[in-house]
Image: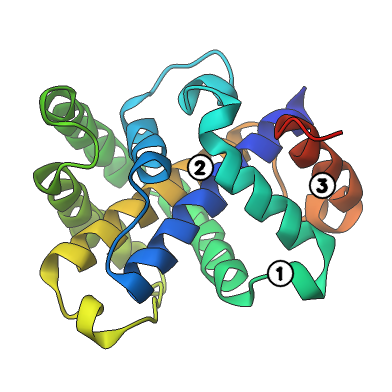
Amino acid sequence: SPMRDRVIALAALLQAVEQVQLMANQGQAQTDPLATCINSLFIFDAADSEQIYGNRHQIKPGLKRLYNQLQGESSRDNVITRIALNVLHLERQFAKNLSVMSTVHEQLAEIGLESKQLGATHPDILSKIGTLYAEKVSPLGAKIMVQGNPVYLAQQQVVSEVRAALLAALRAAVLWRQVGGSYWDFFLSRAKMAQIARELQGLH
């Protein structure tokens, strides 16, 4: 269903943002959840949202985070909310810029071939995606501020990985729009989205 597709896209967006936070605060991401997000950058044609992320088990961290974000103040992480909303704003600028979109698409197709050999979370792959984000995508909108431990955020590799994860978050935001997502969902369909996020985790 369209709502299910939207929930999957939002869960993926939050999963990517959560990895951004982990890198900024602890200097490293969780390999599997990050790989799921990065791999989505190389999949351009998929029948539904779930296929882009392999399967729903691979976005379980994001589904859990989405459920918590929708549940209310006590379980919500405001930093993650802020970054996610900034990514959704950036998506609006990105969608208007067809030349940037096609450049990003072309370069990701090339990086994707390399990632088949090296793996999605290989430092060289994350570094190339990070550079693509910094050069092409970041200038389109207000800079997405990521705060964390200055020791880690001073390391070029961590900065590259944060940018790569932000591009994966943007990919999820693009998908969310494509499957009919709108800000109204957060006001009108909050309970429905939370229910679907629970069900997709295998919780009833």
Mark 3 element type = helix
Q: Nearer the viewer, residue 57 or 90?
A: 57
Residue type at mark 1 is Arg
Q: Distance of mark 2 from mark 1, alpha carbons?
A: 20 Å
Residue drawn at (23%, 55%) of the image: 136
Q: Quadrant of residue 115?
A: top left
Looking at the rendered image, the disc whose residue lies closer to the viewer, 2 or 1, is: 1
Looking at the rendered image, the disc whose residue lies closer to the viewer, 3 or 2, is: 3
In the rendered image, which residue does mark 3 sit on?
194
- Work out whether mark 3 precedes mark 2 in sequence or the reverse, and give the earlier one: 2
Q: Nearer the viewer, residue 102 or 45?
A: 45
- Work out whether mark 2 precedes mark 1 in sequence or the reverse, and give the earlier one: 1
- When the figure is inspected, residue 8 is found, relative to residue 183, above or below; the finding is above
- When the figure is inspected, residue 23 is found, relative to residue 125, above or below; the finding is below
- When the figure is inspected, residue 177 is found, relative to residue 106, above or below; the finding is below
Q: Nearer the viewer, residue 152 or 16?
A: 152
Query: Does residue 52 appear to the left or right of 178 in the view shown?
Result: left
Q: Nearer the viewer, residue 171 or 200?
A: 200
- Work out whether mark 3 precedes mark 1 in sequence or the reverse, and give the earlier one: 1
Residue drawn at (22%, 67%) of the image: 159
Mark 1 element type = loop
- Mark 1: give few (<14), some (14-19) or many (20+) Cα within 10 Å: some
> What is the number of the mark on residue 76?
1
Q: Distance of mark 3 from mark 2, alpha carbons?
A: 18 Å
In the rendered image, which residue does mark 2 sit on?
172
Colour scheme shown: rainbow
